[in-house]
Image: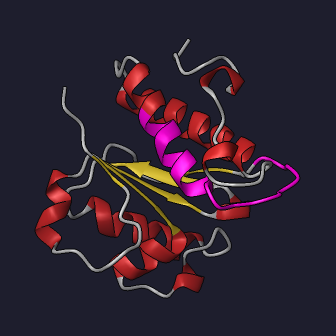
């Protein structure tokens, strides 16, 4: 099954009709603010109703799963089948350089999603977001961009869903 992943970085406003073709929308909080027309400060785990409204904004346009990375506050995500969003806190690590964190998250997510088996959609999303979060947490502990991205064997349990 063909799946589309959109990481709109750097973000610019997009036409609404684009979203119906997006299966997985992955962005950080500032990109989510630009694309949803909200204030960046409102996209924060301290404001759950505002965060839920931003996720719902994209789901209502036809996106199947919306994922917003929140830096040191982790990641939130919701699928079109879920009634509320899920939050995974960031792993507590010693941060050296955040240069490749977003790209590592997106790449880790895509690999984990593609290898998850995709039998149960929501379980596959949970698995992919968890692995992407782990990959990004490894990347921020290292200096540089390409050199900080972890190898597959550095991700606990690999990228195959048990």
> On the image, which quarter does residue 132 sit in?
top right
Rendered location of residue 37, percent (x, y): 36, 85
For the C terminus, the quadrant is top right
Rendered location of residue 68, percent (x, y): 50, 60
Task: Tell whether 34 sits left or right of 133.
Answer: left
> On the image, which quarter does residue 11 sit in?
bottom left
Task: Tell whether 125 sits left or right of 56.
Answer: right
For the N terminus, the quadrant is top left
Check the image and report above or below for 24 versus 34.
above
| Residue farthest along the left direction in this orientation | 17
Residue drawn at (44%, 73%) of the image:
31
Tell me if residue 94 is in the magenta stretch. yes
Rendered location of residue 21, percent (x, y): 15, 52
Check the image and report above or below for 100 versus 139.
below
The color scheme shown is secondary structure
Tell me if residue 161 is in the magenta stretch. no
- Depth order, front residue of 91/87: 91
Residue drawn at (84%, 50%) of the image:
92
Magenta segment range?
91-110
Residue drawn at (48%, 41%) of the image:
107
Task: Tell whether 52 sits left or right of 20.
Answer: right
| Residue farthest along the right direction in this orientation | 94
Task: Tell whether 71 sits left or right of 124.
Answer: right
Rendered location of residue 82, percent (x, y): 39, 45
Check the image and report above or below for 138 versus 7.
above
């Amino acid at each position: 099954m063909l799946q589309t992943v959109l990481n709109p970085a750097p973000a610019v406003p997009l036409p609404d009709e684009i979203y119906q073709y997006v299966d997985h929308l992955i962005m950080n909080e500032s990109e989510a603010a630009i694309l949803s027309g909200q204030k960046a400060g409102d996209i924060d785990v301290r404001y759950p109703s505002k965060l839920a409204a931003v996720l719902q904004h994209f789901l209502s346009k036809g996106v199947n799963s919306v994922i917003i990375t929140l830096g040191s506050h982790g990641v939130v995500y919701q699928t079109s089948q879920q009634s509320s969003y899920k939050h995974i806190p960031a792993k507590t690590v010693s941060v050296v350089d955040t240069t490749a964190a977003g790209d590592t998250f997106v790449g880790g997510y895509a690999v984990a999603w593609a290898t998850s088996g995709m039998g149960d959609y929501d379980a596959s999303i949970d698995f992919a977001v968890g692995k992407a979060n782990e990959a990004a947490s490894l990347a921020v502990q290292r200096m540089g961009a390409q050199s900080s991205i972890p190898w597959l064997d550095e991700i606990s349990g690999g990228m195959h869903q048990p």
